[in-house]
Image: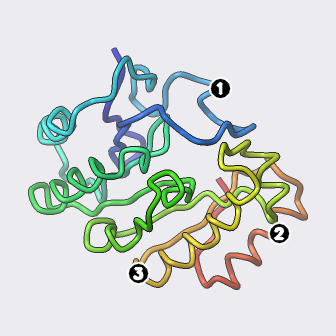
Amino acid sequence: MPSIVYRYGSRYYINMTNRCPCRCTFCVRDETDRLGDADSLWLDREPTVQELEDKLSSLDLEGVPEIVFCGYGEPTERFDDLKVIAGFIKDTLHKRVRLDTNGLGNLINGRDIVPEMVGLVDSVSISLNACNAEEYLEVTRSRFGIDSYQAVLDFIKECRESIDGVTVSIVGGSISQASEEECGRIADRMRVAFRVR
């Protein structure tokens, strides 16, 4: 049975969609069906907001520092539902909310979504994945084409100005060592944290 919420380490993760505008060369979806305690992260259908809220309400959240939107798809593909669930997590479950994203949410939704995240999302982890537009497209195969990379950079900058905890990440070994190092310098220039996954 597909898992709509799963535990990985000390956190719970919400798997609300399998839709994604990218087909990254390193995507974990191509390696395994599960992460953490999940049965399978491939969904037969997308769970409703009510189903996700019911599942979250049934969990023992003692000692859980935050709940993360991150599954086998890009969470901002369901951004309007994400906002409702994030509000529920903060107002009813009294937990911090983190969004793990590819940073293409503005393109996906056709609008600037960052102002709508303020007050609902406490921290954001954004996949940078490359040090320039050409490398980004080669690695992610984004359906939005060559403009994707600049959209990610713009999203990072806007998040940094509006949300306290912003981290950019890359997948170690998916690009050259030189590119990894340049990604670290990009993060430094943008004044955000940097992590190699």
Picture residue at 48% right of the left edge, 32% below the top: 35
Looking at this rendering, what residue extends furthest in the left direction? 92
Residue 52 disc label = none
Inter-mark Cα distance, 1 to 3: 34 Å
Picture residue at 47% right of the left edge, 75% below the top: 159
Inter-mark Cα distance, 2 to 3: 26 Å
Mark closer to the observer (1, 3): 3
- State the image coordinates of residue 188 (x, y, percent, origin top left): 69, 82
Residue 30 disc label = 1
Looking at this rendering, what residue extends furthest in the front direction? 110
Picture residue at 44% right of the left edge, 26% below the top: 41
Residue 181 disc label = 2
Inter-mark Cα distance, 2 to 1: 26 Å
Q: Residues within 10 Å of mark 1 (few under 14, many from 20)?
A: few
Q: Is residue 159 above or below residue 86?
A: below
Which numbered disc flags the more N-terminal residue, 2 or 3? Answer: 3
Q: Circle 1 sits in a helix, a strand or a loop, which is it?
A: helix
Which numbered disc flags the more N-terminal residue, 2 or 1? Answer: 1
Mark closer to the observer (2, 1): 1
Q: Amino acid at mark 3?
A: Ser
Residue at numbered disc 3: 162
Quarter residue 5 falls in: top left
In depth, the one of 63 and 161 nearer the eye is 161
Q: Circle 2 sits in a helix, a strand or a loop, which is it?
A: helix
- State the image coordinates of residue 172 (x, y, percent, origin top left): 75, 51
- State the image coordinates of residue 180 (x, y, percent, origin top left): 81, 62
Q: Is residue 116 above or below residue 75?
A: below
Mark closer to the observer (2, 3): 3
Q: Amino acid at mark 2?
A: Glu
- State the image coordinates of residue 48 (x, y, percent, origin top left): 22, 33
Q: Is residue 138 above or below residue 95?
A: above
Q: Circle 3 sits in a helix, a strand or a loop, which is it?
A: helix
